[in-house]
Image (cartoon, rainbow, N blue to C red):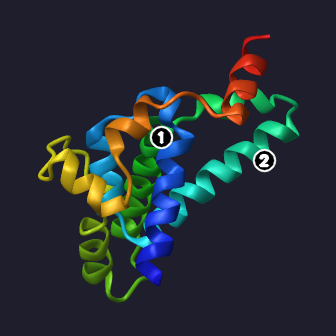
Amino acid sequence: MKDKRLKKRLKSEVESDKNNETRIEDVAWLCSLSETEIDMLISLKLLIIQRAKMIGYKELANKFNLKMIRAIALVLMEHLKAEIKDSSLIPDMVKSTAFLDACNLLKCNNEVDATVEELSTSIGTDIPTFLKSPLTSKRKKQKVGSRE
């Protein structure tokens, strides 16, 4: 059940970025993330959307694709890691930094260990067909709206 929800959320993250040329490396990276790491990425995207609406530039949120959100998450996690290392208030500092080192959000290598077929099986969709499929009506409206 939990695995099914994770796959659904992962699929929606890839779908929201399919017009921005999601690479297979990005899909493999997403597959390596834990549920809490995916939650963080989704929360970042929701925060970006909310802030863009508040300043009156809803179309600005569309420019934050998976690669941009991945970069923001990397910067935030590196900052957190530096803060934990500098902090003398945390008694088990070594355990905390070891935990952050194991975090897949910090993994930047673009090497893909799995084939496209294995990734397709993992998330339950045909990735090449999915990425080449035409725009949904919602995405068409967003693209047209952002060009005006």
Q: Nearer the viewer, residue 86 or 106?
A: 106
List the residue tagged with mark 1. Answer: 66
**Residue at the spot 20% in from the left edge and 40% down from the top edge:** 110
The answer to whether residue 90 is left or right of residue 25 is right
Task: Give the secondary structure at mark 1.
Answer: helix
Residue at the top extreme of this rendering? 148
**Residue at the spot 64% in from the left edge and 34% down from the top edge:** 136
**Residue at the spot 43% in from the left edge and 45% down from the top edge:** 70
- Indicate whether 77 appears above or below 27: below
The answer to whether residue 98 is left or right of residue 50 is left
x and y, in percent, of residue 7 in the image: 43, 65
- Indicate whether 144 appears above or below 118: above
Picture quadrant of residue 37: bottom left
Q: Nearer the viewer, residue 120 or 18?
A: 120
Tell me the kind of residue under disc 2.
Gln
- Indicate whether 49 appears above or below 101: above
x and y, in percent, of residue 44 in the image: 60, 53
Residue at the bottom extreme of this rendering? 91
**Residue at the spot 29% in from the left edge and 76% down from the top edge:** 99
Tell me the kind of residue under disc 1.
Leu
Say which mark, if any, is on residue 50: 2
x and y, in percent, of residue 148 in the image: 80, 10
Check disc 1: other Cα within 10 Å, few if <14, some if 14-19, many if 20+: many
Q: Nearer the viewer, residue 98 or 116?
A: 116
